[in-house]
Image (cartoon, rainbow, N blue to C red):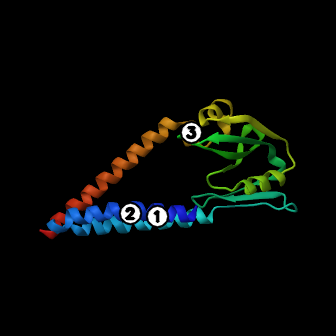
Amino acid sequence: LFHRGITAAILFVGPVFGVLYLIVLPDGQWLAVVVTQIVAVVVAVCASIAFFRVGIWLSPDADVISERGFFGRVTHFNKAEAEYILLSEVYTSDGSESRPQLTVMGADNRRLLRMRGQYWAPEHLDTVAAGLPIPATRIPGTVWISEVREDYPESLYFFERHPTAFVVAAIGATAGTAATLMLALALVRMLST
């Protein structure tokens, strides 16, 4: 995953910023592209660090399971709070393949822990399942995320339960970023004249 991420970043950043430099160099507005590239690299490095800090800690001797999520938030739950494990094989969004998912559910169908196959190896999911002496519910066959949303909505993250809200937020973030970059470019142009 790490190598694929680095390769994807290079294959994206290289041509995109290469073309941007070719477009702006004759006009002398290259500083805006440099600033944008620096911001993009800093964001990518921070995201990589966050990804590699993600972890789940459990031990047969400990009563508590801890998880550090992507944004650094550490959560804990007592093994006694876990009521069942939901196991599923879920198609990727394009339907070309599927990935395993494990969700530990507590009282009132509260999600205590979620592990998705695109981030965790199958043996990691097996380790967590084996570390909890609770029943496992397996969704039969391979399912779409919409089927999981319909039957087990509590097992999903907010943006998966409400995909429209996620799309609206993504569009808003993109528009906000574009507006910020346009303002930065206007400021650079104003300062260079």
First in residue order: circle 2 vs circle 1: 2
* Residue 37 versus residue 168 in the image, above or below: below
Question: CB under 8 Å between callouts 2 and 1?
Answer: yes
Residues under labels 2 and 1: Cα distance? 10 Å
The one nearer the camera, 39 or 73, is: 39
In the current view of this chain or complex, which residue is farthest to the front?
96
Residue with the mark numbered 3:
95
Q: Which badge, 1 or 3, comes first in the chain's sequence?
A: 1
User: Vertically, is 5 above or below 109?
Assistant: below
Residue farthest left in this picture? 193
Residue placed under numbered mark 1 in the picture: 44
SS for callout 3: loop
Relative placement, left or right, of 95 versus 42 is right
The residue carrying mark 2 is 13
Q: CA distance from mark 3 to mark 2?
A: 27 Å
> Percent from the top left, x then y, of residue 131?
83, 55
Q: Residues within 10 Å of mark 1 (few under 14, many from 20)?
A: some
Q: Quarter-wise, where is residue 172 in the image?
A: top left
Q: Residues within 10 Å of mark 2 (few under 14, many from 20)?
A: some
Q: Can you tell which of label 1 and label 3 is closer to the viewer?
A: 3
* Whether residue 13 is visible: yes
Quadrant in which residue 2 is drawn: bottom right
Q: What kind of element bears circle 2? A: helix
Residue type at tag 2: Val
Q: Describe residue 82's horizontal placement relative to residue 175 as left or right.
A: right
Please give the name of the residue rendered at 51% of the width and 62% of the height, measured from the top-left corner: 5
Q: Secondary structure at mark 1?
A: helix
Query: What residue is rendered at 25% in x and 66% in y?
Result: 21
Mark 3 is surrounded, within 10 Å at the Cα level, by few (under 14), some (14 to 19) or many (20 or more) other residues, namely few
Q: Looking at the image, which is closer to me, 50 or 96?
A: 96
Image height of 119 relative to 21, above or below: above
- Identified by mark 3, the residue type is Gly
